[in-house]
Amino acid sequence: MQVTSSTTPSSSGSTSSASGVAALQKELKDLSQELKDLATNSSLSAQAKEQETQLIQAEIAAVQAQIEALQNAQQQAQLNKAMQAANSSAKAQGSTKSKGSAKSNLVDVFA
């Protein structure tokens, strides 16, 4: 019986999440192919095939969970970046607006 080993990249700060997702998707494709190959393997007993199938399916589920976690982290990072940009923009507009409103008050008072 062939035993598969799953070595997935960690989602460390040094590994970009986009490349991490790509690597995990490649691993997912490889595991799917392994599962197909197992189905046509006639050298294994039914029990061995069943055990190997369960192992590969568990690995597939783990890889899918890692992909989902990385994608969620990417989305959260994008949201955080957008929120920071919006906050910076709002602060800049608020400072400009308050200066402008002071001028408009002066114009209104003296007009």
Image (cartoon, grey):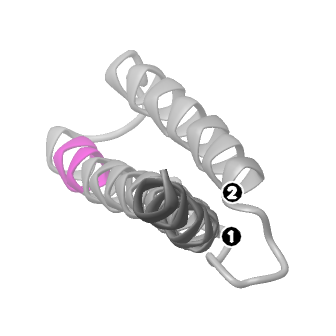
Q: Are marks 1 and 2 in contact (CB under 8 Å)?
A: yes
Q: Earlier in the sequence, mark 1 or mark 2?
A: 1
Q: Which residue is mark 2?
A: 20
Q: Regarding mark 1 in the picture, which secondary structure is present there?
A: loop
| Quadrant in the rendering for residue 5 | bottom right
Residue 56 or residue 18, whichever sits in front: 18
* Residue occupying the point 63% across, 64% down: 96
- Residue 2 seen from this side: yes
* Residue occupying the point 40% across, 30% down: 38
Q: Amino acid at mark 1?
A: Pro
* Residue occupying the point 70% across, 48% down: 18
Extreme-front residue of the structure: 111
Q: Is residue 49 left or right of residue 108?
A: left
Q: Which residue is mark 1?
A: 9
Q: In the drawing, what numbered circle is on residue 91? A: none
Instruction: Rate crowding at label 2 as few (under 14), some (14 to 19) or many (20 or more) other CA atoms within 10 Å.
Output: many
* Residue occupying the point 68% across, 70% down: 9
- Residue 1 seen from this side: no
> Height in image: 33 above or below 49?
above
Distance from Cα at disc 1 to Cα at disc 2: 6 Å
Instruction: Rate crowding at label 1 as few (under 14), some (14 to 19) or many (20 or more) other CA atoms within 10 Å.
Output: some
Q: Is residue 2 left or right of residue 55?
A: right
Q: Main secondary structure of the magenta part?
A: helix
Residue 58 x/y as whole percent: 26, 58
Q: Is residue 41 magenta?
A: no
Residue 104 or residue 82, whichever sits in front: 104
Residue 28 or residue 33, whichever sits in front: 28
Range drawn in magenta: 49-54
Q: Regarding mark 2 in the picture, which secondary structure is present there?
A: helix
> Height in image: 4 above or below 95?
above
Residue 106 x/y as whole percent: 52, 67
Residue 26 x/y as whole percent: 66, 36
